[in-house]
Image (spheres, helix red, strand yellow):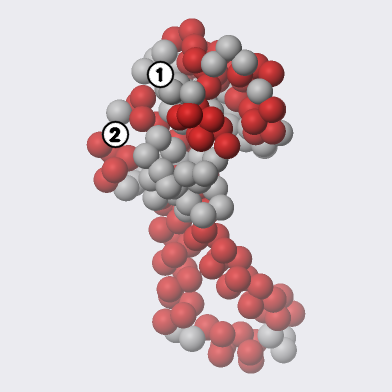
Amino acid sequence: MAIWRLMIMDKDLTSFCGLWCNDCIPGNEKLYALASELYQLLMDIDFKDYVKIKSQKVAEFRDYDIFINVLEAFEKLHCYNYCRKGPCSEAGCAQSCKVRVCAIKKGLEGCWECNAYFSCEYIAEMQLFHPDIKHNLAMIKELGTDNWQERRGRHYNWSKQLGIRFTP
């Protein structure tokens, strides 16, 4: 786990929109370290040359270039920071995030301080990907940024449990 994640307070891990940074795939340091290590190893051993020969017998190896493109694009999702500090990543949370910009412009600590969050178009858009975001905002409003984490909802539509925490 990155040192910065160990030194920040829980409040800092609560994003403007009510998501918990430690539940987010782009913030999973172990995942990105492994992907980076795999990419580097493949480059170091010239695996592309190996694939050229092996693809005659293993058809899936013919898609190796696509696999490498995905690994390279994958890095664009990696969050090196948390939402409150930004910028986070090229394709995940970004400093130009509409929710982040709106909250800062209104001088809010987060959307839970806005009376219109329940009908907000930005939150509605995010709810398609993060189904329990309004639940999270209600929990933060009720319990505060230091005490809501144990009551948070699913981060993603496919999350099978509440508040999935990635381990280092």
Q: In the image, what residue type sits under mark 1?
A: Thr
The percent position of residue 55, horizontal first and vertical second, equals 69, 85
Disc tally is 2
The percent position of residue 148, horizontal first and vertical second, equals 45, 16
Question: CA–CA distance between discs 2 and 1?
Answer: 13 Å
Instruction: Report the residue that reaches farthest toward the front.
Output: 105
Residue at 49% in and 86% down = 46
Q: Secondary structure at mark 1?
A: loop
Residue at 44% in and 47% down = 88
Q: In the image, what residue type sits under mark 2?
A: Ile
- Which numbered disc covers residue 8? 2
Q: Is residue 30 left or right of residue 127?
A: left
Q: Relative to 155, does residue 89 appear above or below in the rendering?
A: below
Q: Relative to 95, does residue 54 appear above or below in the rendering?
A: below
The answer to the question of whether label 2 and label 1 lie on touching residues, with beta carbons closer than 8 A, is no
Residue at 61% in and 18% down = 117
Q: Secondary structure at mark 2?
A: loop
- The answer to whether residue 141 is seen in the rendering is yes
Q: Which residue is mark 1?
A: 145
- Which numbered disc covers residue 18? none
- The answer to whether residue 127 is seen in the rendering is no
Q: Nearer the viewer, residue 83 or 130?
A: 83
